[in-house]
Structures are given as C-alpha cells and as structure tokens.
Amino acid sequence: MPDGTEVLVDPAVSRGKFERELANYRTFEDAMQRRGQWLLRAEFPEVFTVFAAPRGTPPVVVFGALLDYTNYDLWPPSVRLVNPFTRQPYRYAELLTRLPRRDPAAPPPAVPGMPTPVQELMQAFKPEDVPFLCVPGTREYHANPGHSGDDWLLRRADGEGSIYNILDVLWRYGVDPIAGLQMQMTLAPAFDRIPE
C-alpha cells in the first residue's frame, strides 16, 4: 500500500467486498442525496462523502468523511471526518459537530426541561488529536483497548462496517439534528481578487 499499511488480505478479495458494499449503497443513493449526503468519490479502498445540512437558508456543508476499506473485511473500515474541500482530517478542536447522541445508559432527567446527558461519538484524548468515530463497525473502535471484548470478526456479518451504515450514523448524529442556522455573516471581498 502507498501509505505503508501492511496488506493482510488479497486486494482482489477486499475490492470485491468493497464493490458489493458500494453497489448496495447505490440503491439508496438518491434518498441520501436528498438528505444532504453526497458520495463524491469511491475508488477502492476509499470512499469520500460530503455532508450538508439541507434545512435552513442557506444550506451549509458541515463536514466530509473519508472511509478506508484497506484489508476489508478482516479489518473494519477506518473513518475520519475531514475538511470537505481539502480532505485533510479535522483535529478534535476543529470539529463543527462531535456527533452527540443521548447517553443510553443515563436515566432520563429528573426535572422536565433539563438537558439529557449525551455521549460524543467523535472521540480524542487531546484537542489537537485527529478524532475517531467510536462506534462498532469502525477500525478505530475495534482497535481501541477499551473495546477488546467486542471483536470485529464477531460483528462483521451484522452490516455495521458497511458504507451505508457508517454514512447513516454520520448523518443521523452529525447532520440530521441541525434544524437550521443562526448566524451573522458579512462577506469580505479581497479587492485584489475582484475580476475586471
């Protein structure tokens, strides 16, 4: 592999499984586009998708996601949230969303109107770290020592590492909760770049 990743699975086998995942995703692609999810590039072993929040005016691009299916499906895919224009991974402090979800282990608030405890699905140890998506079906989740009892090989038939499932998780927790925008914006033109 160009990045130095050790090849453990015949690339033809991984590519075949990747192509099946991609074909399955394509059956839902029109619905995904309507909700603001655009798969821009899918060339083995990577998938690059951009997520936008279609509600509100104007609609906004929220983040990009880069999925790496190297050694699939011996390994689950790796997931990174990236700048949608440069494809550079975000640092934890740069994230526009940390994919919050209600904490399933927390009891409901005792007082109506109190905020419900949340978990952030994007995790990092320090603000300058590249965060990882901490959900089953991702390489970073299953490689984490805290999840050593939750082996990928026991889950891989469940569909959690599929392109559709991972992109759906990113949309459900990162984009769907956005109801609209509240912003104050002033365009600042660079006068030396104004065309004649």
Image: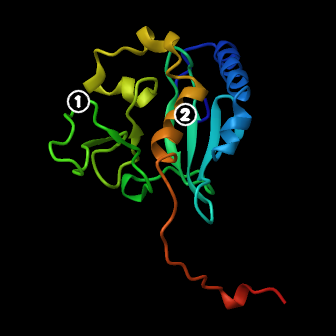
Q: Can residue 12 be seen in the rendering of this structure?
A: yes
Which residue is situated farthest in the left direction here? 110
> Which kind of residue does numbered mark 2 sit on?
Asp
Residue 45, given in percent of the width and then of the height, sits at 64, 29
Q: Earlier in the sequence, mark 1 or mark 2?
A: 1
Give the vertical position of 196 relative to 160 (above or below): below
Q: Can residue 4 be seen in the rendering of this structure?
A: no
Relative horizontal placement of residue 150, taking residue 166 as reference (left or right): left
Based on the displayed image, in which of its 4 quarters is residue 188 positioned? bottom right
Relative horizontal placement of residue 159, taking residue 133 as reference (left or right): right
Which residue is situated farthest in the front direction here? 112
Identify the image quadrant of the N terminus.
Answer: top right
Question: Which residue bears the numbered disc 1?
Answer: 105
Residue 17, given in percent of the width and then of the height, sits at 65, 16
Question: Which residue bears the numbered disc 2?
Answer: 168
Identify the residue at image location x=41%, y=24%.
Answer: 136
Q: How is the image coloured?
A: rainbow
Q: Secondary structure at mark 2?
A: helix
Residue 143, given in percent of the width and then of the height, sits at 37, 25
Identify the residue at image location x=56%, y=43%.
Answer: 65
Identify the residue at image location x=65%, y=86%.
Answer: 190
Based on the displayed image, in which of its 4 quarters is residue 12 positioned? top right
Identify the image quadrant of the C terminus.
Answer: bottom right
